[in-house]
Image (tube, rainbow, N blue to C red):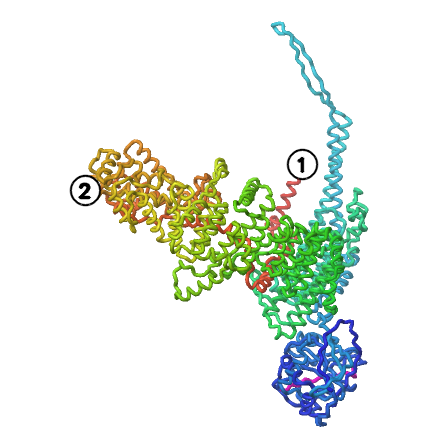
Amino acid sequence: MAEAVKVKKLKSKKTAKPKIREHVADSTAGPESLLDSAKQLVSEDVIQQFEGVFEASTDITLDTQASIDDRRNSDLKANASVYNDKSAATQDLVETFADPKLKVLKLMRGPSNQLEEKIAPSAPCHSMAFQIPSAPLPTAVSSEDVNLKTNESLISQKSACEVQESNTAISPCTSSIALPEIMTTLPSDIQIEEFTLPHQVQAFQSQIGSVKSINASVADAFQYAMKDENTTHSSALKVRETEQPKVESRLCTVIPKSVEVQVLKPFTEAQLQSFYYNTELERNEATIEDFLQRYAFENLQNHELYELLMNYYRAKSQLKAAEEDLQVLEREHRRLLNLMWTSTDHSITIKGTCRDNTKITAKHSYTRVELNDEGYHALEEDLKKIRGQVHETLALHMYSVQLSHLQVESYLHRLFNSYVPLQNITQNAPVQFTSTRSQPCMDATAIEHFRTCISILFVMQRRPITDEGFLSITRGWLAQLVGALLRIATLNDHLFILNHVLRCPLGFGDWASAFVQVTPATGWQGHSPESIDHCLTVLSTILAHPRAREDYLSHMRNMEAGDETGQSKLWVMLDSEGEEEEDGSQVLFAMAENDVMALLNQFQLNDIFCFAFSMSGGDAEFMYDIHKTTEQGMLKLFALASCVLTIFCHGLTTFHRHQYKQLNKRIGWLICEVVQYVSDHWSNFKDSRVVSHCTLMPRLQTEFDSFFFKATSCLLSAKRLGAWQFMADLSYACLSADAVWHLVYTLHTSGTECTDPSQEEDIQEITWRLQDEDMMHQLTDKLQLMPQQEAIYLLTAFSNIIISREESEDVLTDIIVSEIYEVSFIDVVTRDFCSKSGRDILSAIAEKQLSVVSLLLHKIKKSVHQIGMMALTLFNEMPLLLWQPTTDDMQLIAEWMLKAELSSAENQLARLILSNMNWNENECGELFLPVDLHREVAILITETYSKHIPENRQGLFYYSIQQLYNVSALLRVTPAHEQQLYSWAWDLIHRLCLHAHSQPISAQPRAKSEPIAAPASESCDRWEEFLNSIPQLHTTLQLRTVANLVRDDGVFASFVALAMTNLGHDRAEFLNAGLGLLLRLVHNQQFLGSVYVLHLVTPFFFDNPSCLSTSEGFLSAVKAISSAEQTYTKMARDLFAPDFPGKILKMFSAMILNQLEHHSASPHNVIKFWLSVFSSIQNWYQDRNMLYLMDNLIAIAVSQPGAMSHVEFTFCDMYKSMSEGGGVTPSRVGSFLSWFSSSGSNLPTLIDKSSLPEFPYVAYSVLSVEECLESGLWKALQTELAHNATASVETCLKKASSAVKVNSPSAGRLCIYRWAQQALDTHMQHPLLPLLWQKFFALYLQRLPEQLGLPGRSGNGQRFFQSMLNSAYMKKLKKRLKETAQLYSKLATARDSIAANEDDVLVTPSLSNTSIKDAYQPSTATCDQLYMVFSAYLLWMDEPRLHDLSLYLPALPDQYHAELLVQIFQAEQKAWLQFIDYSSIEHMLSQLDDVWQAHFNATPQAKLGRYTYPANDHISTATSRILEKLKLSNPSLSAPSVALIKAPVPAITASVISDENSLMSAVRGDLELLVECAKCVLL
């Protein structure tokens, strides 16, 4: 019986792995026999399974057995140094051979009967455990030598593999692509032949299809690729023997063996050093030890410079003491000066008598001063002491100080002059970073002397010196020497300076941080591998505790007893409980936080990663290319970053005390920055590579996980860091799934250390533990013990883990979301401080994974009594605009809506969710939520509404609810629950897309009013298909509740029936039944719903307006809607705060505009329909509300080319219907005028007032028609005025009326006055104002007909303004034109400087309540154009020559615009549309549209905008983050400048002494100084 191939899943590391013995088959057979044996060993299915794993080779060559043995022997000798002595006898080499389809391994018998099989695939492999069939096969291998030629590129002579007792020895086999290794074992009686057939390979592959992964031990391959030293790695393969039952197979019997493969292990620290090894860092301890021995104080105190400095210090100290003694004498002098004179006050009184016998008295007071002999002698003695102190002691010490200072400077001058390289240093020379000295003449002795002098100057900084002047001077000398040394420095010189700086007293960061230079001045472009090593060495030295710092600062110990005054200068450090924290003497020797921060600022982390990323470009522009990084480069990056993390971790350990809190945070941020750099680069690397073609990808992922866990462990192990703050900012997107599970488990348990995922913890077991309630309680207890801020950081870290992961990891998402929900809203202790942050965190998670919304919804169902109203706060921040509910979600919402009380949290939460969902269309122009869901929600709202707000036939309860809600809104109090439901239901039902015309335009069917561009059959079929999809009110089963409520006169159900069913989609159904439902809405004062119904239904009648314009019911509904806000309450409120137009009126006008913009019908049809409806309403021109609607409709018509003709025809029809003897409706204005002129009657008018300043569009249209009406009367009047030059206008008007047989109107009813008044009353920024003035000037400047032949004036315009009253009226017109021109001039010159007065801002009638900040501001070009035309109007008004017949128009200046005058003189009636500010009209219309969108639009785009994410965000963001961080680096302090030390005393040569002029020139300055001093002494 053959045994089937079995696949075994990898178990935990607890599984025992016993030792094994391997047997070697007889290898004497030839290659043909090996092939036959291989075919018998495995089935075809097993062979086929490996076809996709192993790459075929095309080269097969044979070699002799002797050559193989020779090569084996040479390899054994080469690797003998690394083999274990006990197991060396068991080592066998594996030679790789290939046939055309598979690389077959030759089996050789070793000394210990061990058989190895090695396969070197080129495709990626994963860890697996499998069993190989085993059976005794006939001997098919001949005794002839097998000649096989090994591919030399696949064997590395440098590789070696350690043999252990528990592991199978693996022979190293490496290649340029780092191929992994796989081993299987067979008994000694098995012989294998080659795999030749492709289908056999596929069969083999299918046999092991359930294998999880194949372990690829690539450590040796990495060694070869990186060309480092040989490192012995233990095998990752462990083989275990198990007895298996035997079953029959087609070819062979299964071997009772199983091979189990371990999970890929990350490299150890020692193994990582093969990719990045910092030799300078390793030698740093030896360098520090050499520094301590060479530059100890004992070795420097006998130096000449030290003696000179000490002399200088002693002289300075003596001078300071002498100055203090002098100050004492001066104080005594001031005291004795007050005692030398004794003063007494005296007074004399004199009395006398004046001549008038008046007695007077005078008193004189004076002070008498007497010399005190004792005080005089004491002062004399004190002055003698002062003179002696100044002339003897002070002068001597000052001379000593100057002399000592000159001696030190002379020594330093000789020091610089002794070495030629120092003399050649320029001031702008860069800092050097070389491994060896670049100047050959700079011998070691000279450099050592120079470094010794620097050390001595550092020694002076470590002494307890309080003389700031001495410290400042010595630090200046030190800066000069250090600056010179940095210009010729090697890397050891930089470390030398750093070690000195680190052993200076507290505060060295202020004056010595510039001495530490880490990177070249050229930036990262000047980096080399040695400079990177040096950067890390400097960083490690800074973050490590300086050895022997206490010894170097031993001179500072005497400061513990206090200074000369006996006052201690040490602070006592106390802990949080007020106790002394540590020994005060140690504070002096510990480095200050600011000092370490100053040194750390010199370190540029960005330069290291610029070098690691192989970036190019200048410092201002970085060229980042991920394709420059290879697999080996990523391994180097991981090793380098791990080294940096190790250094930072040591820094956190070193500076763990409380006084280093800010430093710890700085190090923590640096760790996060390192992780971010590596994560972003690793993310880009994975995205730029094909995983199946990258053999090292599993290894790289393992190393990245290990690196990330090192960083996490470093952060969590810091005692005073506050690690959760940094854990919240890490990016977890690049971690593997297993690593994320381990990380989450670690954060739940200890939180102080991070377990490596390579420890082979069972993920399923971790999942069970995290889902355990005890783990939840443990997390809750942990949060209670943590500070509130840290607890929030921990929850944020959990959320970032989920946000950065894929949506497929739903189990992990459920666990973390459940925990955040529990601690934020359920636990009574933690929710007090976690609820707000938890809400924001859950909202952020839900934005990335929308399934979280459903998860939270069902969790609230289970814990609604615990969370209560906090559920509303939670879901108010949820991204419900992006959420699409499931069937279970909708069932739960419906259950809460129908079964829960209105005051309950469940009902209010259900309403909140439905309100915040996206009922609008998506970016593709389709509904975000399906229309069936819209209809389902509409039915649900109807059922809820009818349950809680019952409506009787009289609508009393309904009316009461509405009035109570209005009063509540007015008083700003919280309405009752029924009132809230009422408002919510109507608002939401308006936003649902239930009707065909509320659907996106792309989804709307073609209405009958649309012009059919497609074939008629196609259009009809589409229309019929749409009609069939419309729910039928009385036949659709789901609508039976709605139908019953409609029969019961339900208002809400009536609206739903009109919006969703056939009653609102069919003309006949609407006219028969739907119109009654509309009237029901109107009669129950549901005006917004009525407006929305008009928006939905009226487009079906655009092609036939008469169906509705002749319907009394429809017209009454429109009239009632327009007058909806004419209530007593509204009128009373308007007395104090006028508010016109109201909300309903604005919405009506906005509805028309919305139909025009969003309906597929022709805009002209929309305008014609509403003109027909409005004009059919009786006395509409006397109703302010209807005038508002008509005015906005005409404004819309002005914005549509050619639409004003419909307005003109409509008004002509209206005038004819208003006149007597109405007949056939004229189709043209001309026929209308001829009809009217033949009927003698009064002139009809639609404007009873002198003007309509609120509604200029209506006024313009009406006056234009009326002007045509009275054209006959106007011509007759012009004739009478021409024949009677002295008659008044009233007299001529009566004669003209008699001539045309009409009743004589008043002179004020003439169009010239009405146009003038309308222009005078209209706002100066109204778009139609230029056309109103055009109409006035067309009459004012009109020329008389030529057939009259009258000499003199050519027009009678001025005759209308000759009277006293009309003359004042003319002045008003001129003033208005002047003000208008000045306004546009002001706007043109300074567009933003609009006058503060509200009258200077356009407030159109349709937007009378618009604030000033929302007012329209015209463009500069528009202002210039309007200023030009109004200036011309003003000139026309003032220029009398325009009425002269002899006027030559081309002679007029350009400001008159003769081309416009020509059109007026030629009586052209074409409107000057070029002067209309269409932008102003568009602004007004856009504000109207905003009113509609604010109420009826399902999802405001502004709110949806925050959830909009750019495309391809992942790759671009990773790259942009790298580039952004590289540009944000803080500049470090530059090195001290190089200033050559001049000779303190000029050299006196023999030539100077021999030459009199030269000698006098040299000593003249000194002689003048001596003369001046002598003069001072004499004085």
Q: Residues within 10 Å of mark 1 (few under 14, many from 20)?
A: few
State the residue at coordinates (32%, 45%): 1217
Residue numbers of the magenta segment: 88-99
- Helix, strand or loop at disc 1? helix
Q: Which residue is mark 1?
A: 1578
Rendered location of residue 726, percent (x, y): 68, 57
In the image, 1002: left or right of 48? left
Q: Quadrant of the N terminus?
A: bottom right
Rendered location of residue 376, percent (x, y): 75, 28
State the residue at coordinates (56%, 59%): 1509
Q: Which residue is mark 2?
A: 1348
Q: Note whether residue 409 is visible.
A: no
Residue 95 is a magenta residue: yes
Q: Residue furthest bottom?
A: 143
Rendered location of residue 504, percent (x, y): 74, 54
Q: Main secondary structure of the magenta part?
A: loop
Q: Note whether residue 1161 is visible.
A: yes
